[in-house]
Image (spheres, rainbow, N blue to C red):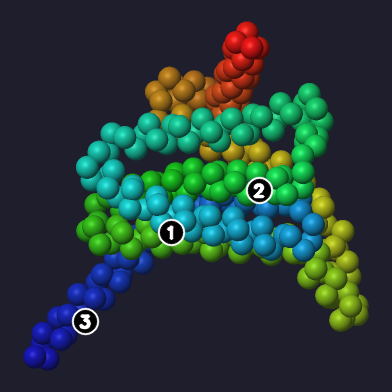
Amino acid sequence: MASGLLALLDDIALIMDDLASATKVATKKTSALLADDLAVGAKKASGYASERELPVIWAIAKGSFINKIIILPAVFVLSYFAPFLITPVILLGGVYLSYEGAEKVIDFIFHGGKDKKVSKEMTEKEKIRSAVITDFILSLEIIIIALSTVQDKPFSVQVITVSMVALLATVGVYGLVALIVRMDDFGLSLMVRYEGVLKQTGYFLIISLPYVIKALSVIGTVAMLAVGGGIFVHNIEFFHSISEKFIPYISDILVGFFIGTTAVSAVKALKRMKRLFYSNSS
């Protein structure tokens, strides 16, 4: 009886050690994407009135949790029964990310980055929807990369490890996003309650926030292009061979911008054709 219990405890210890090791490797492999997810998340969650910041972040975080609930079982099923479908799905996600990034760049170049005037309520809903869709694609990429690092492990270890990485991608990322967008409130609290260095720190946090948000907005756009382009570089030989002529991250951005501008042009062409069709039919 005692020997059986000791054997069971030994097995549990080995599984826990295997899980810790696998999670560490998977997190390291996905760290760059988690950083990109943070930049994109902060970009998507900024630009609201102070009282709407946390509700918007919470809405995006809930959408992110739902994304994980959908993606995790779907990826495990695809990986087991139809692994050949994973790459096309990722490529479609790469097109979307590249499209979003390129659209922002084109809008900044030709319109100074000014958004069209729409109602405040619709703008908020559209931003949340866009953030959740972007999170879905980044989450899919993170989960698939995490799964690729534990393919040689037992299925139970794969499920737990990838699920832990997915949870980190939501709790960690949107927790940090919430801290960033509320940085000014924390700074104000320091200024009101303390004197000396802490008061100066609070003032620095307040005046720094607009610059941090602007920087994250730029980083988020670049991240979308880099992740979108990186998907094509890593999965399409043609783009991979071209990328070898450039610095790795730069090549991902260039490929992402090329894919994105192509997608933007295609969407605009389709919209023109749609308008012409309706004008002729009327």
Q: Which residue is mark 1?
A: 165
In the rendered image, which quarter is residue 106 located in?
A: top right
Q: How many marks do you count on the picture?
A: 3
- Of badges 3 and 1, the one in the foreground is 1
Question: Of callouts 1 and 2, which one flags the residue occurring earlier in the amino acid sequence?
Answer: 2
Identified by mark 1, the residue type is Val
Above or below, comparing residue 187 to residue 113 in the picture: below
Name the residue rendered at 86%, 81% in the picture. 193
Question: Label for residue 9?
Answer: 3
Along the horizontal axis of the image, is 15 left or right of 253? left
Circle 3 sits in a helix, a strand or a loop, which is it? helix
Which quadrant of the rendered structure holds the C terminus? top right
**Residue 206 seen by the camera:** yes
Whole-angstrom CA distance, mark 1 to mark 2, is 28 Å
Q: Which residue is mark 2?
A: 125
Place of residue 242 in the rendered image (x, y in percent of width and height, measured from the top left): 49, 20
- Of badges 3 and 2, the one in the foreground is 2
| Front position in the image: 50 or 22 | 50
Question: Of callouts 3 and 1, which one flags the residue occurring earlier in the amino acid sequence?
Answer: 3
| Front position in the image: 230 or 251 | 230
Question: Label for residue 244?
Answer: none
Name the residue rendered at 54%, 59% in the picture. 62
Circle 1 sits in a helix, a strand or a loop, which is it? helix
Instruction: Check if mark 3's residue and mark 1's residue have beta carbons within 8 Å.
Output: no
Identified by mark 2, the residue type is Lys
| Front position in the image: 34 or 127 | 127
